[in-house]
Image: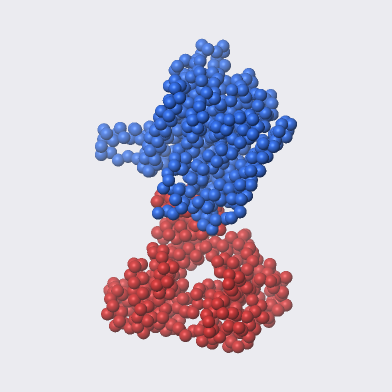
Chain colours: A blue, B red
Amino acid sequence: MNRKMIVSILAKLMLLEALLLLAPAMVAVYFGESFWPFLLVAAGCALIGLLGSLFLPKNQTIYTKEGFFVVGLVWVLWSLVGALPFVITGAIPNYVDAFFETASGFTTTGSSILTEIESLPKSILFWRSFTHWIGGMGVLVFLIAIVPLAQGRSMYLMKAEMPGPSADKLVPKTANTAKILYLIYMGLTLTQFILLLCGGMPVFDSAVNAFATAGTGGFSVKNAGIGAYGSPYAEWIITIFMYLFGINFNIYYLILLRRVKAALHNEELWMYLGIIVTSVTVIAFNISGLYATVSETIRTSAFQVAAVISSTGFSTADFVQWPNLSQMILFLLMFLGACAGSTGGGLKVVRLLLTCKIIRRDLRKIARPREVSCIRMDGKVVEEETLSGIKTYLLVYFAIIFGSFIFLMFEGKDVITTFTSVVTCFNNIGPGLGPIVGPAGNFSTWSAFGKIVLSFDMLLGRLEIFSILLLFMPSLWKKKVL
Amino acid sequence: MKIDIIGCGKVGRTIASGLAGEGHDITVVDHNRANLTDIAQTADVMAVEASAFDYAAHINGENPADLLISCTNSDEVNMLTGLLARKNGVARTIVRVRNPEYHDNMSQIKDELGLSMVINPEMIAADTISRVLLFPAADGVETFSNGRAELIEYPVDPGNPLIGKSMREINLSSKVKVLIAAIERGGDVIIPTGADTVQQGDKIYIAAGRAQIQTFLRGIDSYKTSVQTVIIVGGGKISYYLADRLIHEGMTVKIIERDKMRCEELAQLLPDANIVWGSGTNEDLLGEEGIAQADAFIALTGIDEINVIVALYAKKMGVEKVVAKVNQLSFTDMLKSIGVDTIVSPKKVTANVILRYVRAIHASGESSSIESLSRLVDGRVEALEFIIREKDRYVGVPLKDLQTKNGFLVACIGRRNRVIVPGGFDTIEVGDSVVIVTTHAGVTSIEEIFR
């Protein structure tokens, strides 16, 4: 374990957080609010960052384990530090609450402990939504895009942070790959921002909603969520962009290169679209009695499916009031999540796709034991190693869900609330089911212990489990390899 | 530069990580995933799992690579991949061809296939070994002007007659003209002027023709280990190329080969060599063939471990210069410390030659006036070879009238079959190949070095 190099990268990341904290400070200046809490934390970060970057380690080589370690540590660290402005401004006086809120922001979960949102300072609301935007594409991907890191071994860092079973390079250099991803991300965010502005939404609201959609986060600046704007246009724009941000960014890159055929040759994309169309249709029929017009029914159904499958977690309707079938579909979509390589959370469509293929092959094997076959995706053979990795992932995934569920049951809440809280946090969605944590509720009733467990579930979910789990393997902390 | 590397064996990997480290955009292609995983984890490159043909056939016409290097283990695949790549718009191609039959007739099809460079690892390895034997006192040798000019790295050990002498004195006292192009002293690099002196512990870089350097080293009594008799164990392709060169230089060569058929072949190919049928691992045989009297012993069998062991045995028997070929083992430092003088890895030297070429085309950009670019002293000194193609303001002017900028030096001039060590009255003419030694990186034309 190359500890010095880990410290050096973490120091650079602290400098980056200091830089990012200047954004809400400027918002505070603009709205005439107090900006010193942000500057204070930024100065602290900068000081620690500068101290850490003073000495450059001689041995700059990092390997897979350092990559995972840095990623795991930095997300915890950023959440711990990012919570400070909430506490200092008094917006969220309790530090554990603030940590939950920040972790929920960076991991793009969007679960909130706030009961009253609209009265908070604009700069605080901005910071809350801005964390979604930063966390969506990943903090290390951002750093890799702007500073050369770790002598050509930065792929280790990126691999640990990108959602999905494999991170592919778009171009030979990791730094350029990261830049392209961020440019696509910024481009899409900007487009959405402009489209929202065109629909008459205020500038501040357009910006924070675009941030929350891009990161597939789901923090809203209104108590009643997106429904508060009462604008079908804005709802449709946000719906479409939620679906768009749930698609693998490699596809956008291929489209930019005008290789549309190659872009559409993606099984995961078609499965994602298929699931969306099916879910929207079934839910629309199921809730048709609850809404006045057909267009409102379809809009609401499409919006809620988008909010859940992209793991954003916005709401225009309190779906806790919907029939059980619809609630069940949404609940299942919470597990599924979006495509690999997108900003969405959850299990990822590709894992479901490959699991289905594994099941089909193994069934055939029972019937025809001598048949030799291999699993293909997008026309390419998938290695057995990848497949067994997916099986392991599924096992650990459910083990963590049930483990957290049992821990939280000590609090004595009902099964639906407890279970959906874990599922929604772990998959980075936002709202759960039931009256307490549903779209109309919030997470403030959990104890400090419950909030910490849920915060870790969010971090585990965002980093696809292993980066955080590896932090708890003492044998890896050692300086020496042996 | 955008570079595709086809075939990700040892050569491919060495080139890929070397070039990626110098900031190029590298794509490596191999059909074996294990090879790709290895390189993708240690270097910043894009790994593509595909067959060589398939990849070359699908190169995108809009954005092709600047250079494609094909080094799969099949000559035929390499040549055809190179051809396809050229057809699909790749500007330059380098292919590896090892079969001597193909290689000897390469000049005919090289242009036909549009290849920029054809490399033969065995031939390059033989060149490297022959240079080591020609300058036993040197630590390293770079060649320029198609092998006519050399730049040798020479350590100044205690008691060397050069110590304390200035460049001017060295020139006056020596029978032949050589040029000390750079001095490495305690981590610093000096491009010397006439008044600089050589000190103990320096490493000096001497430029001149081969014969001139030999005479110079003999003059300062540093050519004591002049190699006259050589024993080569193993009769593969490298042995053939090497023996051919050494015989040409007037040395006596004895090849020990295990396979009777190969012995007969070699006897036909090399009429002046002494071919012995027997095992190079046989102590008695080695003694009988006079291992103790040989000036140099070269182990070139196909098995690394045998090469190392017989080389160590030769060292113990008192052979002055011992060379072992090592393909797979990566313990070169350890092997040197236990007494093997020189380790030659054909794959590594091949990779170095390609790196040198790529640096040259990268440095000269579009103009392609740089013929080759070598990095010395951990890359702090560059030795560039320019071909003078047209008349310019510096052509025909005596060097003393052309004011050279600080940190630049004209090290030697290759004119037709001669090598000129430039003095103040020499001129640069059209058609010359000029070697410049400099501490400044990023020179793209010879124009830049004059005031």
Q: Can residue B131 be seen in this view?
A: yes
Front-most of B89 and B195?
Answer: B195
Q: In this view, does B252 lie to the left or right of A36?
A: left
The image quarter in which residue B368 lies: bottom right
Instruction: In the rendered view, tell whether residue B154 sits above or below residue A282.
Output: below
Tell me residue A135's x, y (percent).
56, 37
Front-most of A470 and B343?
Answer: A470
Residue under the point 66% across and 71% down: B407
Tell me residue B159's x, y (percent).
53, 84
Q: Quadrant of the C terminus of chain B?
A: bottom right
Residue under the point 62% across and 20% down: A228
Residue under the point 26% across and 35% down: A368
Tell me residue B271's x, y (percent).
36, 80
Instruction: In the rendered view, tell whether residue B55 sits above or below residue B267.
Output: above
The image quarter in which residue B357 lies: bottom right
Q: Quadrant of the N terminus of chain B?
A: bottom right
Query: How many numbered marks, from 0 up?
Result: 0
Q: In this view, does A479 lie to the left or right of A138?
A: left
Front-most of B98 and A348?
Answer: A348
Q: Can residue B217 be seen in this view?
A: no
Tell me residue A266's x, y (percent).
47, 36
Residue under the point 37% across and 78% down: B315
Front-most of A283 and B209?
Answer: A283
